[in-house]
Structures are given as structure tokens and as C-alpha cells.
Amino acid sequence: MNVCSWIVCERGGRWTPALRLALEFDRTVRHRVREVRHLGELAAEVAARPTSVVALEVHPSNFAESLDWLAQADRDYPQAGCVVLCDRAI
């Protein structure tokens, strides 16, 4: 069975439970979900798991920093996929 690693970077605990719930219906792939709370922690996690899917929460207080991280991730972690999680207000 294939394994897909997810790294969720969010300040609260809102997105990860929803992601776990959505992924549990996929019986063809085993999903592993890891959580970090700050962008500073994210680089180490992605370096350890370079083929992961990164789900990054973007909110008004980290908007610019998140865009910088995403631009750098394209260069530093070319095998990783990135998903942005944000409220409709953004």
C-alpha cells in the first residue's frame, strides 16, 4: 500500500481534524499526518520528509511570511506539494 505524508502547519487545531476525516475515506493510500505550529518548525519537517504534502494555514498575521516560505519551498523542496489553507475572508 502506498503511503502519503502530510505536514500541516497551523496555529490552532482547526484544519488537521478536518483533513484526517477527509483522508480516512481514501482506502487506496495510507495517510500519515504530522502537525507543526510555526513556520520555523516546518522546514525541518519537510527536510526530513521531502515528498510530503504541506498544508500551510495562511492568515492575516502570517500572510507575507507564508508567501515567502512558499516561494522558497518551490526551490528548496521541489518534490513536496503545497496546499494553502485559509479563511474565505483572505
Image: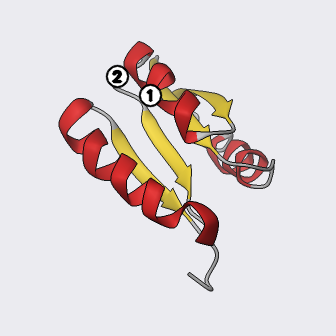
Decide if residue 34 is in sight here. yes
Secondary structure state at the residue bearing disc 1: helix
Q: In this view, does 66 lie to the left or right of 61?
A: left
| Label 2 crowd (10 A; few <14 / some 14-19 / many >=20) | some
Q: Which is nearer the N-term, disc 1 or disc 2?
A: 1
**Position of residue 58 measured from the top left corner of the image (x, y, whole percent):** 56, 62
Nearer the observer: mark 1 or 2; the answer is: 1
Distance CA(mark 1)–CA(mark 2): 10 Å
Q: In this view, does 33 lie above or below 23?
A: above
Q: Label 1 is placed on what type of residue? A: Ala
**Position of residue 11 measured from the top left corner of the image (x, y, whole percent):** 73, 49
Protein image colouring: secondary structure
Q: In this view, does 61 lie above or below 36?
A: below
Residue located at (63% from left, 30% from top): 33
**Position of residue 48 measured from the top left corner of the image (x, y, whole percent):** 43, 13
* Residue labelled with disc 2: 50
Decide if residue 6 is in sight here. no
Residue located at (30% from left, 40% from top): 73
**Position of residue 36 measured from the top left corner of the image (x, y, whole percent):** 65, 33
* Residue labelled with disc 1: 43
Q: In this view, does 33 lie above or below 87?
A: above
Q: Label 2 is placed on what type of residue? A: Pro
Residue nearer the viewer, 82 or 23: 82
Q: In this view, does 13 lie to the left or right of 56?
A: right
- Which residue is farthest bottom? 89
Residue nearer the viewer, 61 or 27: 61
For the C terminus, the quadrant is: bottom right
Q: Is residue 20 left or right of residue 65?
A: right
| Label 1 crowd (10 A; few <14 / some 14-19 / many >=20) | some
